[in-house]
Image (cartoon, grey):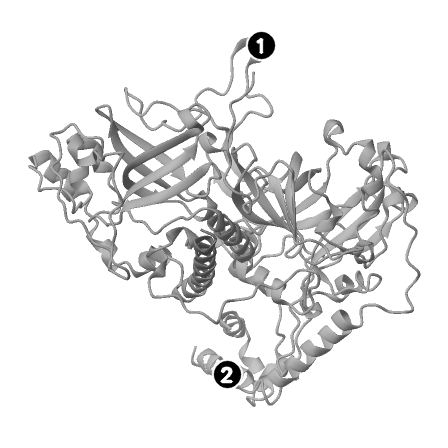
Amino acid sequence: MAASMTIRNIVKQAIFIKNGSIGINSKLNVAHKSTHRAHNPNYNRTSAEVTLALRPKQNFLHHDLVDKHRRSPLQKGTEVLQTETEVKAPRDYRFVMPEFMPRPNFEDRDRVLEKLERCDMFRRRTNITIPEFYVGSIMAVSISDPYAPNKRNRFVGICIDRGGIGLKAYFVLRNVVDGLGVEVMYQMYNPTVHSIEVLKLEKRLDEQLYYLRNCPLEYSTFSFDMEPVLLPRDAEIPVNTLKVKLNPPPWEQKWERQNLKGIEPLELTPRMIRGIEMHLKPWEKYDLMLHYRSKVPEEEEEQIMSEVYKEKLKQDSLRKVTKATLRKKK
Amino acid sequence: MASKSILTCFLRPSCTTLLGSNGTVASLLPTSYVSVQQVRHRRYPKFVVRQNKRKTWHVRKWTQKYDDNLLTSNEQFIKDVIVENYAKNSDSPLKDAPWDRNPYVYGTRRTGVLALKLGTMLQWTTEGKPFMVTLLQVLDNHVINYVPPEVYATYPSHLPHHRQKFGLQIVGALSSDPRMFSKPYNNLFIKAGVPPKRWLTRFLITPNAACQPGTPLSVNHFKVGEYVDIQGRTRDWGFQGVCKRWGMKGMPASHGVTKSHRKMGSTGGGGDKDGIWKGKHMPGIMGDILRTQYGLKIWRINTKYNVLYVTGAAVCGRPHTFVRVYDTVLPRKKRPESSYESVPMPTWFEEDATEPLPEEYFDSKLFQFTSPSLEIEEEKK
C-alpha cells in the first residue's frame, strides 16, 4: 500500500512538472486525435459545443453591424448618413416634438428609415403649421370632408391623448356636441388635415385624460366659437391644476389604480383598496434597466433633436420671410 | 488528470524502476488510452445534436483564424491594403469586354436583388387613404457569377422540367473583410473582382438577361409602379402552441374548463377516419421558413440611399432581414408590352443615365408631402 502511495505521489509530481513546463519544453508526444467531424458524426460534444449548436439562430443582422457596413470604405453606391453637429437643441426638446423620437426598442430601429421618415415629416410641416401642444391644450382642427357644408369640418376640443411615432403620430380631441361626449382621433400628418390651431396652450397634471369620460360633461365642454388665448412670447407653458370630480362608479377603467393627479380624492371601498394593494409595483422605480429601456439613449436623442431643431429654425425663418413679403404686397 | 493517476495505481511495483526520475515519466507514459474502468452512469452527452447537412459543393464560409501577434498599427495597415485592393483598383483593364445587351422580350426573366428590410412606414394615396409601406434597402449588391443553362442542367439542384431554359445568376450583398472568411469562400469572388460578400443568393434567369460578374446592382434595376415578388425567412418564433401557430381557438376561460384553455381539443374522428391524419396542425417550431409575397407594388424609390418603398407591412422577417426581390411572376401583374423598351436590360448601368438622377421617384397615385393638403371629393357611384 505504501509503495503504491509513493508511486502516486511521484506521478503527480511528474504531471505537475509536465504541465508547468509547457512553455519551455513544448515538444511532448501527443497521440493523434482526429478532430474532423465528418469522420465521426456522433462524437461526444462538449457542453459548450452543444449549447452553441442549440442556441436560436437569428435570421437578421444586428443594427450596429448594418450601420458598420453602410459606413464601410468597401461599400459603394449608397450615401452615408451624416450626423448633425452645428446646432444644438434645447434640453428636453423631445417633449415639444415627441413624434420625432424613434421607438426605444433598438431591434425595431433603423437609422436610414428614421431619417427618411423625418424628411417626410419636415416636408409636410412646410405646408401646414403643426403647433406646439400638450395633453390638456384646447385645439381646433379642420379637415376636408366631402359631405360637410363648404366641404370642411371643424372640430374644437380638449386634447386628451397624444401618441404615435413618426408619420403615424396622432392626437385625440374631446368635446360635447348636443349633450353627447364626442372624441375624434386625428393623424397629424394626414394630408386631408387642413389646419391645426391651438386655442389655449396649457398642460394638465396627467399624461392622458381619458377619465373625462366618467366626469360630468361640464369638464369637457368647450365652445366652438372660442377665441384663441394668447401667451406672452417665451413664457413657460402654464399647468392647469384643475382637479375634476368623477361620477360615481361604474367606470370605464379602474381609475383608482392609476395614480391620477388630476382627480379629486375618491371614496375607496375595501374592495378597491385590496385591488390597489394587489397591483402596486413599488420596485419599478428602482428598476434601472426598465428606465434605460423605456427611452432612447441620451446621445442619440441629442443628435436627432438637434437635427429637428435645426430644421424647425429654418422653417420658421422661411415663414417670417413669406409673411414679410405678403405684408409688402398689401 | 484524475484518470492518469488512476492508471498508475494499477502499475505493478516492479515498474517503479522505470519511474525513477521525475523528468522521464511524462515521455514514457502514453497520453491517450482506452479507459479500463467500468462506466455505470449514463453516457455523456445525453443527446447528440445532428449536424448541419452541408452540401458537398458548398464551401465552408467562416474561419476563426487570426494572428495574435498582430499589432494595432499593423492592423490598420492591413485594412488599408484591403481597401486599396478591392475598393480602389476594382476596374482592371485586363478584364474581358462588356457583354452584349439584349432587348427585353416576352418571357424574359431578369436577375433580382438582395435587399435589407428596414421597417414599415405610413403613406397616403392622392385620395387621402392611408396605407403601410415596407422599406427595402439595396445595399452594396454585386453580380458574382453567371452559370449558363447547359452547365446548370448538370447541377443536382436542377429541376428536370426546366430543361435548359434558365441559367443561374449569383448575387451577393454587403462587402466585408476577407479575413473573416475561409480561403475557398474568398476564391468565389475572384472572377467578379469584388470583395467577399456576407450574403449570397442565386436567381433563375433566362440567358438573354445574363449580367457580367462584377456588375453592381442598384435600386434603379426596378421602376416605380412595377410589381415585385419578395422572398425571405420569416421571424423565428421558436416552439409555439397551437393557438399562436395555427390560430386555433383554444377553450373557454371559465365554465368548468381546467388546464386546457389553450389546447387544441380533438385530433380527429373515429370509424373509417380514425387515427391522427398526416399534416394535423399541432404545436411545434414556428417561423424561420422561406416565404414569398407575390405582386407587391413599388410606390416610391429613393436613389440616394437605394431604398424601395413596397406595398404592405407583410414582408417577412424582422427589420434587417435579407430578402430576395425580383420581377413578379404573376401573369396579370407583369409589365405591359408597351413598356418593354424602357426596361433596363440586363440591369441598370451608370452609363445609362443621360442626366443626373432625381433623388426620388414617386408613383402617380402616391401623395407627395411637398404638395398642399388634399380636397377629397365625393365618391361617384
Query: Label 2: few (<14), some or many (≥20) within 10 Å?
Result: some
Instruction: Say what amino acid the circle numbered 2 marks.
Output: Phe
What residue is disc 2 on?
Answer: A16
Which percent across, then down, holds residue A194?
Answer: 44, 39
Query: Label 1: few (<14), some or many (≥20) within 10 Å?
Result: few
Instruction: Say whether residue A168 is visible.
Output: yes
Where disc 1 sits, the SS reads helix
What residue is disc 1 on?
Answer: B272
Which percent across, then down, holds residue B138?
Answer: 67, 52
Residue A65, compared with residue B301, is above or below; it is below
Residue at 54 percent of width and 9 percent of height: B271
Give the camera-side residue of B366 and A109: B366
Residue sticking out furthest to the top: B271
Give the camera-side residue of A230 and A143: A230
Residue B311, compared with residue B65, is above or below; it is above
Left or right: residue A289 versus residue A146 is: left
Quarter of the image with the C terminus of chain B is top right
Residue sticking out furthest to the front: A330
Which percent across, then down, holds residue B279?
Answer: 59, 26
Left or right: residue B353 versus residue A183 is: right
Give the camera-side residue of A231 and A13: A231
- Chain designation of label 2: A
